[in-house]
């Protein structure tokens, strides 16, 4: 399913993959976020850290009652306040998608799948 935007010049279709890539890049810019976790490995109890090329696998884009909803599965860094990192991710994703694509995101659900020790050498 693609997101359809109408402008005075015509119609624009934006795929869910594009929206999830933009959301992932915006989230990775937040302090305290180590990376995205794969949704498919949640049932095994194993959370692998996804690289930049696979950010989409940790993000789900869907609509509820005609409103855009984004689910992010993340891994945070040890020693950071999880609620603050999650709030920053929500704000950054909503703002970035509004500025770059022009869509209003109604919900950004953040699922913290793990905590990792981060080396800051």
Image (cartoon, rainbow, N blue to C red):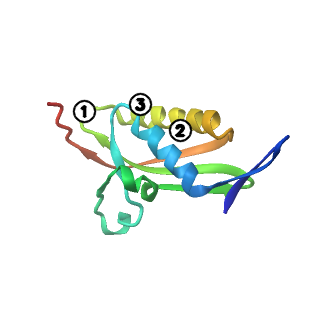
Q: Nearer the viewer, residue 2 or 115?
A: 2
Q: Secondary structure at mark 2?
A: helix
Q: Residues within 10 Å of mark 1 (few under 14, many from 20)?
A: few
- Residue at 83% in and 43% down: 9
Mark 3 Cα shell of 10 Å, populated few (<14), some (14-19), many (≥20): few
Tell me which numbered mark, 1 or 3, is placed earlier along the sequence.
1
Relative to 3, is 61 on the left or the right?
left
Instruction: Determine which of the numbered discs, if any, sits on residue 93 in the image.
Output: 2
Disc 2 vs disc 3: which is toward the camera?
A: 2
Q: Residue furthest left?
A: 121
Label disc, if present, on residue 84 of the rendered structure: 3
Task: Decide which of 52, 89 is in the foreground and name it.
Answer: 52
Question: Foreground residue, 67 or 23?
Answer: 23
Residue at x-position 39% and y-position 56%: 54
The number of numbered discs placed on residues in the rendered structure image is: 3
Q: Residue at x 47, y 33 (%)?
A: 87
| C-alpha gap between disc 2 and disc 1 | 23 Å
- Residue 103 x %, y %: 68, 41
| Label whose residue precedes the other's in the sequence (2 or 3) | 3
Residue projecting furthest to the bottom: 44
Residue hosting label 1: 79
């Amino acid at each position: 399913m693609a997101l359809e935007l109408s402008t005075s010049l015509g119609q624009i279709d934006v795929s869910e993959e594009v929206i999830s890539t933009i959301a992932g890049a915006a989230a990775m810019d937040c302090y305290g976020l180590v990376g995205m976790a794969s949704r498919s490995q949640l049932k095994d109890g194993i959370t692998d850290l996804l690289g930049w090329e696979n950010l989409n696998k940790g993000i789900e884009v869907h609509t509820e009652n005609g409103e855009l909803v984004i689910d992010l599965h993340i891994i945070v860094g040890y020693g950071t306040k999880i609620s603050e990192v999650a709030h920053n991710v929500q704000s950054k994703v909503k703002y970035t998608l509004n500025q770059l694509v022009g869509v209003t995101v109604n919900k950004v659900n953040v699922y913290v799948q793990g905590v990792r020790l981060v080396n800051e050498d």
